[in-house]
Image (cartoon, rainbow, N blue to C red):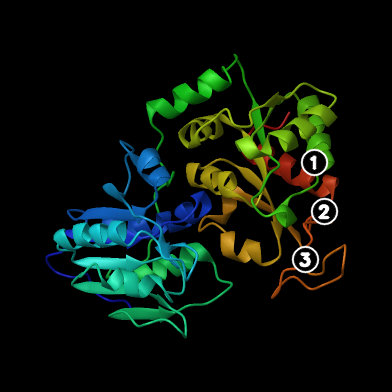
Amino acid sequence: MQWPPLAGVRRIAVLRPNAVGDFVFALPALHALKQAYPDACLTLVGKEWHRDFLAGRPGPVDDVAVMPPVPGVGAAPGTGGDGEAIEDFIARMREQSLDVALQMFGGGRHSNAFLQRFGARLSVGARARDAPPLDRWLPYREPVPRRLALLEIAGLAGAPPTLPPVPELALVDADRAEAAAALPPVPGERLAVLQPGASDPRRRWPAHRFAALGDRLARQGLRVAINGAPAEAALVAEVAGRMRHPAVPLAGRLGLGGLCGLLARARLLVSNDTGPLHLALALGVPSVGIFWLTNLVEGMPLRPSLLHAALSARTRCPVCGQDNVALRCPHDASFVADVGLDEVAVLAGRALDETGQAP
């Protein structure tokens, strides 16, 4: 059922201390909450990077409360945590006299009890079988389309499900300036960005395939940039080194805002299933995403027209043969190497053609 909006809502808190892609998954729900309660202050309970990235950025989030690591919520279950810092944080949240608190962190085994300590008038969220109940809750499911699941949680708080604006994420001048400093734009630029990394090595398309694709794009007259986190510098260098045409390696040269500024300039992103792919989709950038099995179910955007998806259905490890759907074997071999170069190149051509950028 769709719950009606609450009366007299002035302060809302959303618990979502996750990584970049997880934040993007929550954007439709955050926009829905702000649309339902435009005069309320919406606080994202998150991490320092949320605070830094969202400071001064127009959008549904009004402020960020940086929470300390809590056992089971940002820290490993069973660890002690900094008890004094946790109690101080909870006291600050209670002082806000929250009207609504939403748990968007997971199944709630640890996060539901933590959220309840905020003392909100109404608590809502997901609930796994072993989690304490909130005032209003939905059964936790996996795998599910993450954006839709979080929209459904927002509905428990009276926010009607609705498509977010286009783009979902706003740029600021500092984003553009940082991108321009790392990669100065050139007249008539037609930029393609490659993202060969991913936090899970099993989700990485092989470096030599990214290099071959980069050469194809370069032959078509596109300027190729290769992005990656500082820890992915060797991988980015490998892709650039395998290419026969010039490419610009950008590993570690862009913060999150600068990456947004770069992606907004791009005519195409080709990426594994990782945070920059979902940032690009939130910015409205045509993208080719290389997905492993259920990750496509979880990561599909609400506007699928921007995404051209290449999917590997492999479930068994190419090294030991163990099925990796329910359990993870110790090997880090790619589970998306089955996706062919020609398939991704065709999708990239379609993405460029649909935006009028094909040669």
Query: Between tags 2 and 3, which lies in front?
Result: 2
Residue 304 visible (yes or no): yes
Q: Residue at x 32, y 62 (%)?
A: 83
Picture residue at 57% right of the left edge, 18% below the top = 185
Please, what is the three-letter code of the amino acid marked with disc 1?
Ala
| Camera-nearest residue between 280 and 255 | 255
For the residues marked 2 and 3, what is the alpha-carbon distance in whole angstroms? 11 Å
Point out the frontmost of discs 3 and 1.
1
Q: Quadrant of residue 68?
A: bottom left
- The residue under label 3 is 313
Q: Quick one: label 3 or label 1, which is nearer the N terminus?
A: 1
Question: In which quadrant is the C terminus drawn?
Answer: top right
- Which numbered disc covers residue 169? none
Q: Secondary structure at mark 3?
A: loop
Residue kind at label 3, given as amino acid type: Ala
Percent x, y of residue 318? 87, 63
Residue bearing the label numbered 1? 207
Q: Which residue is mark 2?
A: 337
Vertical placement of 201 versus 179: above or below? below
